[in-house]
Image (tube, rainbow, N blue to C red):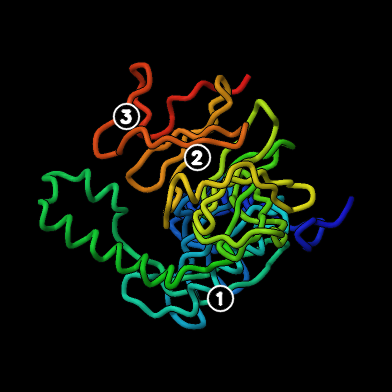
Amino acid sequence: MTDDPMGGSPNARSSRDLVLEVQQAKVLGALFARPVLQRFGRYVVLDVLGQGGMGVVLKGYDDELDRQVAIKVLHEELGEQHTARLRREAQAMAKLSHPNVVQVYEVGQLEGRTFVAMELVKGQTVRQWLAQEPRPGWRACVEVFLQLGQGLAAAHGAPDEDNVVCGVEHGPDGHLYGVNYRSELLTLDPVTGEAFERRALAGVEIESCAMAFDCREGRLLLANGRDRTIYEVDVAAATVVTVVELSAQLPGPWFPTGLEHDPVTGWAWLSTGPELHYVELADGGQAWTVGSFVEPVTQEGADVSNLQYLPACR
């Protein structure tokens, strides 16, 4: 038998075994009218609060500090990428002190699984609160959602240029790519969205961008607002080649908010804030401003204000 991939012993309990043991302990406690204690490290496990594809959340009791906690435990089969992500999240939350953000007490690894012990918040989820009868009034909703927004603002803080991307698209090799504001090409995990590879994107400085996949030519397109140019991205070499330079035809500054390639015509739709443009990608490139998003723009009766009308690649 091989060692657990998360670093635990071969006989370490799985997260699902732990859930089953907690449930069995509750049944035995009810049958024999006495508590049956189940432990996870220093914590007494009282209940299972929830579980999903990433792990399980337990209700625990820290008898050393005399307080109840919520314990998030990752499934043991998840790899180092998910472990590192949970640790980063816990480290970021531990630096915060805000009434609308839960406190993190401990992060560690036990029996081959990474866990985070945090403040246990008693009450309802927002979904449950909204669905209760009688329904909350609009003033109560505003108050609650303001608190949520304040917590999110505190948790996110200033944007991290390493991780904030201005464009995400599949490349010709089937991988998912993004470009961030440090002019880096990121190879992204399609499930978690985490970047597992980042390379400097040579030949371009990113200020704002949008991306699209040209399935006719099998290439990844990048519209860069800084120099008002649409590039082809060589994902293997992490370099760019100019497809069409638009600074004369579409004087800026402009900020691309959407780019879609039309596989029928070979042209592209480019949105720059409130304006929509039709861009020829060959023969020197031409661009026409065809409308504004203030009113829906139509092409042969189809609404293209959200750039979603285009036929799929085949």
User: Residue at horizontal 60%, vertical 54%?
Assistant: 179
Which one is earlier in the sequence, the residue at label 3 or at label 1? 1
Q: Where is residue 92 in the image (x, y as percent from the top left)?
A: 52, 73
- Secondary structure, mark 1, is strand
* Identity, as a three-letter code, of the amino acid under mark 3: Val
Q: Residue 148, position in %: x, y?
A: 30, 62
* Residue placed under numbered mark 2 in the picture: 259
Query: Which residue bears the numbered disc 1?
Result: 106
Q: What element carries label 2?
A: strand
Q: What residue type is labelled 1?
A: Glu
Tell me the kind of residue under disc 2. Answer: Leu
Q: How crowded is mark 2: few (under 14 residues within 10 Å), some or many (20 or more)?
A: many
Disc 1 to disc 2, C-alpha distance: 44 Å
Q: Closer to the camera, 38 or 217?
A: 217
Q: In this view, does 282 lie to the left or right of 291?
A: right
Q: Is residue 67 toward the left or the right of residue 181 in the image?
A: left
Residue 240 in picture, x, y percent from top left: 69, 50
180 over 156 or under it: above or below:
above
Which dot, 1 or 2, sits closer to the camera?
2
* Mark 3 nearby-residue class (10 Å; few <14, some 14–19, many ≥20): some
Gap in angstroms between the C-alphas marked 3 and 1: 53 Å
- Specify whether residue 25 is in view: no
Q: Measuring 70% from the left and 41% from the top, which residue is drawn there?
A: 175
Q: Residues within 10 Å of mark 1 (few under 14, many from 20)?
A: few
Direction from residue 285 to residue 254 in the image, left or right: left
Q: Mark 3 points at which residue?
A: 297
Would you place residue 90 above or below residue 238 in this image? below
**Which of the two marks, 3 or 1, is nearer to us in this view?**
3
Residue extending farthest to the top is: 300
Q: In which quarter of the image is the C terminus?
A: top right
* Residue at 35%, 42% in the rendered image: 275
Ranked by sequence position, the earlier of labels 2 and 3 is: 2
